[in-house]
Amino acid sequence: MKIATVVGARPQFVKMGPLSRLFKKKFQEIVIHTGQHYDDNLSKVFFKELNLFKPKYNLGIKAASDISQISLMISALEKVFIKERPDLVLTYGDTNSSLACALTSSKLNLSLAHVEAGVRAFDRNVPEENNRFIIDRFSTLLFCPTKSAVRNLKNEGIKNGVFYTGDVMAEVLRENLEQKLSSSGKVLEECLTGGSSRIGTVHGGYILVTLHRQENVAAPRGRENLKEIVNALMGFKGRLIFPMHPRTRKNLKRFKLWQKLISRDSITILEPQGYLNFLGLEKNADKILTDSGGVQKEAHLLRVPCITLRKTTEWPETLENGWNRLVPCKRDAILSALKSSLRPGLHKNIFGSRKASEKIFKIITSWLRKR
Ligand code: UDP
C-alpha cells in the first residue's frame, strides 16, 4: 500500500514526523515537498532536526503569486500522482500546498486524508480559511484536532469519515520537550544556545515576537499594519527576541521600517530558528506576540500568555481564560497588551491525548484494508 504525503511549508514539516514514522512500519510513504518554503531555515533544518524522511520529490515551485503557485503545484502534483498511483494521499493543515493537493487528488479520483480537518476561524477574509473549507470538501478521511473542529464539520454537513484524534502538533511539542527536559525539569540550555550563540542563555525577561501573515506584513494591507506593529514595539521598553520570517524582513526594508526597528534598544533579531531553539524561546518567554496559528497553539500548550495580532483565530479555545488575546494591529492596542500583566485563569487540555498519530494510523490502516 502506498501513501503520498504532500507538504511544503514550515508548519507541515513540524507536524509530519510521528505519522511518517508509523507509516514506515507498514506502508510505503512517498513524501512530496512542493517547495512552497524553500529557504533552508524554513525547510531543511526541520528535516534534519526532527529526523524526517527525505522527500522523494521536491517540486521546487517558487512563484510570484498565490494563483500561479497553486496552479504550478497542481500540474506538478498531477504528474507525480499519475506516476506513483498512491492508494491514499495525505496532507496537513491549510497551506497552498494542501489546497493544490486536495484539488489534484479530487480531479484524479484519489482518496484524500486531511490532518487538522474542521479547523475554522469563521473569517473568509483570511486566505487559509478558504483553503480549509475547500480541502475538507475533497477529503475522505478527516482527522480533527479538537472537538470544536468535529462540530464545525457537522455544522457544514460533513459527517462521514470524520474522526476526533487530537492534535499532532501538540504531540510533537510534548515529545520534543520531554526529550529536551533535564531531570530538574528545566529546558536544557541547548534549546536556547544550540546553533545560535546570539540567543545566549536567556530564561525569561523577554517577549518573543513572530510575524509573517500576508495581512500584517505584505502590501497593500500589511504595509499599514506593519507600521503600527513597529511603532508599538518602539514604544515598549522591555526586551524583545524576534526570529524573523524572510517575508517580514524583506517588507520591513521595503517599507523603510527596518532601520527604525534595529535602532531600538534591547531587540535581538534572529534568522528563523530551528524547531528546538524556537521551542526553548517559547517556553522561556514571559509572553509571546505573534500572528502565527501554530505558535498560538504552542503558547497555550506551554502555558505562556499569548497576544495574537489578528481579528479572528482558528484556535478559539486558546482564548478561554485569557491564555490568548486577539489584538488589532493598532499601536496603542498592541502597546497596552504588551504592557499589561496578563494573568490567565484555569488551563484546560484543548488538544487531546498525546498520541494523535497512533489514532490516525489505526484509522488509515483499517480504511486501507477495507478498500
Ligand atoms: N517555528 C520555528 N521557528 C521559528 C518560528 C516558528 O520552528 O523561528 C515553528 C513553530 O514552533 C511552529 C511552526 O513553526 O511549530 C509555526 O509555523 P508558522 O508560524 O510558519 O505557520 P502557521 O502555524 O501560522 O501556519
Image (cartoon, rainbow, N blue to C red):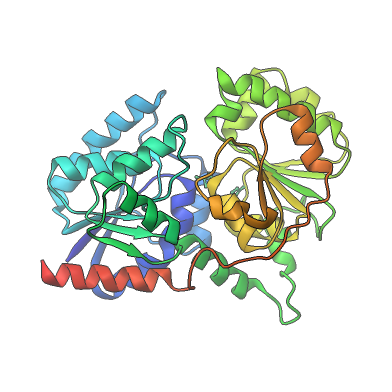
10 over 65 or under it: above or below: below
**Residue in the image at 52% along x and 64% along y:** 170
Please name whichever residue, 207 or 315, is drawn nearer the observer in this view of the structure.
315
Residue 247: x and y, percent?
57, 31
Residue drawn at 25 percent across, 35 percent down: 74
The answer to whether 175 appears left or right of 28 in the picture is right
Q: Is residue 62 above or below residue 45?
A: above
Report if residue 261 is visible in the image. no
On the rendered image, what quadrant is the N terminus found in? bottom left
**Closer-to-camera residue (347/19):** 347
Q: Decide: is 265 above or below 174.
A: above
For the image, the number of numbered tags is: 0
In this picture, residue 221 sits left or right of residue 269: left
Residue at coordinates 62% horizontally, 31% vertically from top-left? Answer: 248
In front here: 364 or 13?
Answer: 364
**Residue pictured at 49% horizontal, 47% vertical:** 10
Q: Position of residue 145 (x, y in %)?
A: 43, 60
**In which quarter of the view is residue 356 placed?**
bottom left
Q: Is residue 111 above or below residue 79?
A: below
